Image (tube, rainbow, N blue to C red):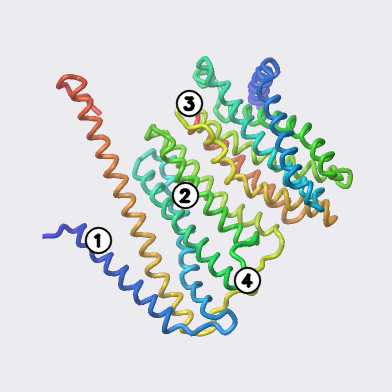
Amino acid sequence: MISALRKIALLTGKDLRIEARSRQTLGLVIVLGVLIIVVLGLGLGMQGKDAGYGATAVLWVAYVFGGVLCFEKTMAVERQDGALAALLAAPVDRGIIFAGKLLSNLVLIFALAAVVTPAAIVLFDFDLSAAPGSFAVVTGLSMLGFASVGTLFAAATSSSRLQGGLLAMLVFPICLPVVIASTWMLVGIFRDGKALGGEGLGVLVAFDAVYLVASWLAFERLLEP
Amino acid sequence: MLTRSRQLWILYGAALAGTTAAATLMMLFYAQVDAEMGPIQKIFYVHLPFAINAFLACLLAFVGGIGYIWQRRMIWDDLSSAAAKVAALMCTVVLITGMIWGRYAWGKWWDWSPRLTFSLLLWLLYVVYLVLRPSIESRQRRAMVCAVYAVAAFLDVPLVYLSTKLMPKDIHPAPITLATVDMKLTLAMWFVPVTLLMGGLVVALMRSSRLARRRADAANADSAWSLSEGEPIRQ
């Protein structure tokens, strides 16, 4: 167990070190996220009296587009210089590779959220102070499910023979339940003053459980040099 | 002299045409007009069997996906692919009949109600499958990626349903109730041709995939023969 955790930490550390040195992915997704917020703000903010609550949906648009770019980039790194073949030849279980990639992706998405969320709060006049804990729990749980599906399909589509944009097309419809659940839960919390819990939280936990297990099991079948 | 397979297909075609004609006649002339919704309610006799068969097709695609991941045999990929295509077709019919029904029942083609959103997301899941297949060249890779997607899409169905329940209340005025025996019989009758259609399409598409694969294998073998100047390469 300790050995597995150490290997996961090593793989995640490797990905994050590459990102810290190249600074390619995070810069790109943060700028993209802010652009999405601004463009949607121009479209919705001018006419929407309910814009504060619209911010929850707008944030998800930024998260999913930025997230898909993160998934693509973290797998694309492995395609360079035959790194993936070397990784697969290493005495590491593929479930551990999945966990390492998932953690790297989660760190990148949380970093994206850390910049994009304040931008939405300001531009949409969204009062996060009403329930910051609930926002963090709902968003965090949703991102876990989203990232596990994204990590799985990034392994499937990372082959250079596949068309670009395929990953977004695969991940979006599969992840729509979590976007719907998360958005309506946040609207319930911030607009209607509902407490966190109940059916919505159950859906998010079910989504995470189903997709973590299914992605972990399927990942090794999809990963090939 | 007809082959056994051809005889079966002719029998199948006759059964499909006969039951469709009978179900249509029952819908038009036997089932009474709903007192509350009027004649538009009759679209329900088509809508529900297609919806149930769409779920069955999704289930078959899932079974094919699991089978391929488990055994790596192309017959499972054929099943999964055929069933996913049929699921997309059935979901399209469900979506269109639902929208027509909604237009006359509530005065608008679309509303973001849980049931309509669920139908739309289900349709999207399987339409993406159709786009995914031709995007991958390698046969084995395509079969594996599509199998995983078919499994993920099917696991997604209950989650889509649960998540849409969190949305604001449905605009459906009331659940459709089939009050009389003639209405129940007409609905039951419609299940026969629609289920026959679903099963027949899955079998036909599976056969078509198998034939296409054999043709591709034969073409590859021919090109391997000519490249090696008469020395065939063992497949």
Three-letter code for the amino acid on which mark 2 is drawn: Phe
Percent coordinates x, y for residue A21 in the rendering: 69, 15
Q: Is residue A85 above or below residue A43?
A: above
Under mark 1, the amino acid is Trp
Q: Secondary structure at mark 3?
A: loop
Crowd around label 3: few <14 · some 14–19 · many ≥20 (10 Å): few
**Chain name for mark 3:** A
Please tell me the numbered disc located at residue B62.
2
- What residue lies at 76% left-to-right and 55% top-to-bottom? A198
Residue position for label 4: B106
Closer mark to the observer between disc 3 and disc 1 = 3
Pair 2/3: label in front:
3
Q: Is residue A26 left or right of residue B188?
A: right
Nearer to us: label 4 or label 2: 4
Amino acid under disc 3: Ser
**In the rendered structure, are the residues bearing label 2 and label 3 in contact, judged by CB atoms less than 8 Å apart?**
no
Residue at numbered disc 3: A160
**Image quarter (top left, top right, bottom left or bottom right) of the C terminus of chain B:** top left
- Amino acid type assigned to the residue bearing label 4 in the image: Trp
How far apart in space, not on screen, are marks 3 and 1 (Cα)? Answer: 43 Å
Q: CA distance from mark 4 to mark 1?
A: 42 Å
Looking at the image, is mark 1 or mark 2 earlier in the sequence? 1
Separation of residues labelled 4 and 2 (CA atoms):
35 Å
Rendered residue at 49%/19% (across/down): A85
Residue A77 in percent (x, y) is at 58, 21
| Chain hosting mark 4 | B
Relative height, residue A165 to residue B182 (above, below)? above
Q: Which chain contains the residue that carries disc 2?
A: B
Give the numbered dot on residue B9.
1
Between A222 and A192, the one nearer to me in the picture: A192
